Amino acid sequence: FFSTRRLLSKRLTIHKRKEERDIVDMGGPTINDAFPNLQGETQISTGFDLYEYLGDSWGIIFMHPGDFTPVCTTELGAAASLEPEFDKRNVKVCGFSCNDSSSHLEWINDIKVATGFQVNFPLFCDPDRTHAMNLGILDETNKDAKGLPMTVRSVYVVKPNKQIALMMTYPASSGRNFDEILRAVDTLQLTQDHSVATPANWKPGEKVIVNFSLSDAAATEKFGEDGYEVCKLPSEEGKDLAKHYLRFTADPTLPNSDKK
């Protein structure tokens, strides 16, 4: 009896581990991985190459489960309305949906009527889900009329070197917050070029955090004798520390006269 129980337990454990491996294997690329080069068709090209399109720019790739979906219709209109903001940040946008080019073109007409904005950026075609499968973004619990799994609604922010800098994934019922997407790009670009991090709810122009890796001496060398302030914390009181862990400094992109 006990031998049978041990054997059954072992089989269940092996099965569980196999399931866990399957889940990991289907995960797709994550932060700091290279985003795969999407090659194929868009609404305006049969020879689209994502890497060529992005060039030396930052990239944002929006995943959509399918054309003529209501939430995504508003999102693509919102993205189109922010074209000047993306240009200002050297960001190129690419949409992705599991339909063909003729469907995309028809949907884009609807988007313009519904939102007032024309989608000029490429909308990648993946009608057979090949690219969605490679990216690990298929939701087996959410299927279309043909019984095919829909893509989850992920956003990838990609650096000029094609590495994934940030990922966000939304359920089908919740529209993406484009103010947050722009804010995320601002913080990614700022922290890549300066020895700082951004606190919760940070917006451009507000104080930033001195990188945790810098000692106080290195921070003084980097930001100046009075260039940062130490947050007085109970855990550090009375200690002779080479590095205080929470230190604030001005947004380094501000002109000197605006830094307070």
Image (spheres, grey):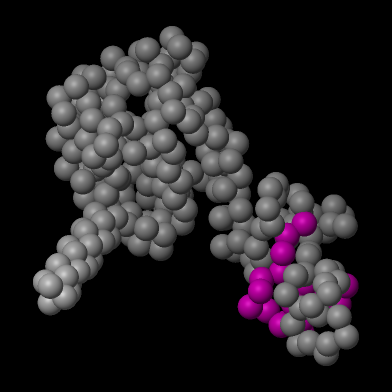
Relative to 66, say whether 256 is above or below. Answer: below
Residue 56 lies left or right of residue 196; in this view the side is: left
Q: Residue furthest top?
A: 113
Residue found at x 27% / y 33%: 142
Judged from this view, the residue extending furthest toward the bottom is 240
At x 38%, y 37%, the residue is: 153
- Can residue 80 be seen at all in this image of the molecule? no
Above or below, 95 against 187 in this view is above
The quarter holding residue 84 reads: top right
- Place residue 232 in its image quadrant: bottom right
Q: Nearer the viewer, residue 8 or 149?
A: 8
Left or right of residue 47: residue 34 = right
Which image quarter holds the N terminus? bottom left
Residue 204, x across and y down, in percent? 70, 48
Question: Which residue is found at the position 14% from the left and 67% from the top?
Answer: 8
x and y percentages locating residue 55 in the rendered image: 37, 50
Return the residue found at the far front: 1
Q: Position of residue 79 (x, y in %)?
A: 48, 30
Examine the rendering and report whether any part of residue 19 can be seen.
yes
- Residue 27, horizontal then vertical, whole percent: 29, 55
- Total number of numbered labels? 0
Q: Is residue 217 left or right of residue 12?
A: right
Return the residue nearer the eye: 55 or 109: 109
Q: Is residue 181 above or below residue 219?
A: above
Q: Quadrant of the C terminus?
A: bottom right
Image point 23% across, 30% down: which residue?
A: 143
Q: Is residue 198 magenta?
A: no
Q: Which residues are magenta?
A: 207-227
Task: Specify whether 141 is left or right of 33.
Answer: left
* Location of residue 242 by image quarter: bottom right
